[in-house]
Every structure is written in structure tokens, then in C-alpha cells.
């Protein structure tokens, strides 16, 4: 296990420092871990809510409403689960030294993009190209 990097409380990654230096990596690692913990906490709350609402509701309208709510909760929980796996993948990329670099071009992903979406795996330009290509193929 490597030593933990000291991160000043008000630290924000800056363009004028070496890309993906120890401070930046630590900043994004902590950001990802906090996000993951938040999602796991929400997931636990969702599970408790689903267990509480599993009671039998005699009124058909109430039962239908409850089933709709339950389906929405399950979809949300599935989205959160997928997001957690993307966060785990980003944390692995930090460990292997691949974090912050575009999967398509190998170029650095902008710090602003990573700060807004720390699980990003492509530069904005590569992402847009990818989405355009996907749209074209979907229209076929």
C-alpha cells in the first residue's frame, strides 16, 4: 500500500501544474471515493424503502401507484449500480496510471471535464465524435 498524499483542504487541480501529478490523482481519487460512498448510502436507503413498501396494499389505485414507484426505484438503483462500477473502473485507472487520458486518442482529458465528470474516459472532442458515429449507425 502506498503512502497517502497530503491534499490541502482547498486544493483544486490547475492547468499550470504537471498533468496528473500526485496531488491531482489524490484529488480525483478522493472525489471518486466520496461519490461512490454517497451512491452506496443512497442505495442502502432505497433498499430499506423498498422493504418497507413491500406490504400489501388493498386499494388497486394505491397498489398501482406503489408498483410504479417501486419500478422507478429499481431503475434508479440499477443506474447507481452501473455508476459505481464506472467509479471503480476510474479508481483502477488511477492505480495503473491511465487516469485522465483519453481511451481513443491517448490525449489528456481536460481538468474541467474530469472535475465535472470524474469517470470520463474520453476527451470532449473524442466523446462527441463517438456519439456522432453512434447516431449514424443507429439511423441505419
Image: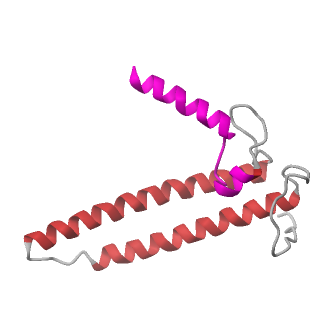
Q: Nearer the viewer, residue 7 or 116?
A: 116
State the colouring used for the structure image: secondary structure
Q: Nearer the viewer, residue 22 or 2?
A: 22
Residue 113: x %, y % from top left: 69, 50
User: Vertically, is 139 above or below 96?
Assistant: above
User: Vertically, is 122 above or below 62?
Assistant: above
What residue appears at the point 40 percent right and 61 percent down from the top-left corner? 76
User: Vertically, is 133 above or below 49?
Assistant: above
Magenta highlight range: 112-140
The N terminus sits in image quarter: bottom right
The C terminus sits in image quarter: top left
Please, what is the dominant secondary structure of the magenta stretch? helix
128 relative to 80 in the view: left or right:
right
What residue appears at the point 36 percent right and 57 percent down from the top-left corner? 75
Residue that extends furthest to the left in the rendered view of this protein: 59
Residue 46: x %, y % from top left: 40, 72
Amino acid at each position: 500500500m502506498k503512502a497517502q498524499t497530503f491534499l490541502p483542504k482547498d486544493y483544486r487541480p490547475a492547468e499550470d501544474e504537471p498533468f496528473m501529478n500526485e496531488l491531482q490523482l489524490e484529488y480525483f481519487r478522493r472525489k471518486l471515493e466520496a461519490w461512490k460512498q454517497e451512491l452506496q448510502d443512497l442505495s442502502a436507503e432505497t433498499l430499506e424503502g423498498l422493504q418497507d413498501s413491500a406490504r400489501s396494499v388493498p386499494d388497486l389505485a394505491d397498489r398501482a401507484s406503489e408498483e410504479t414507484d417501486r419500478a422507478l426505484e429499481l431503475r434508479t438503483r440499477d443506474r447507481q449500480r452501473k455508476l459505481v462500477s464506472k467509479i471503480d473502473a476510474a479508481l483502477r485507472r488511477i492505480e495503473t496510471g491511465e487516469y485522465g487520458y483519453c481511451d481513443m486518442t491517448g490525449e489528456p482529458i481536460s481538468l474541467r471535464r474530469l472535475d465535472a465528470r470524474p469517470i470520463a474516459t474520453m476527451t470532449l472532442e473524442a466523446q462527441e465524435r463517438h456519439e456522432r458515429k453512434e447516431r449514424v449507425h443507429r439511423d441505419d
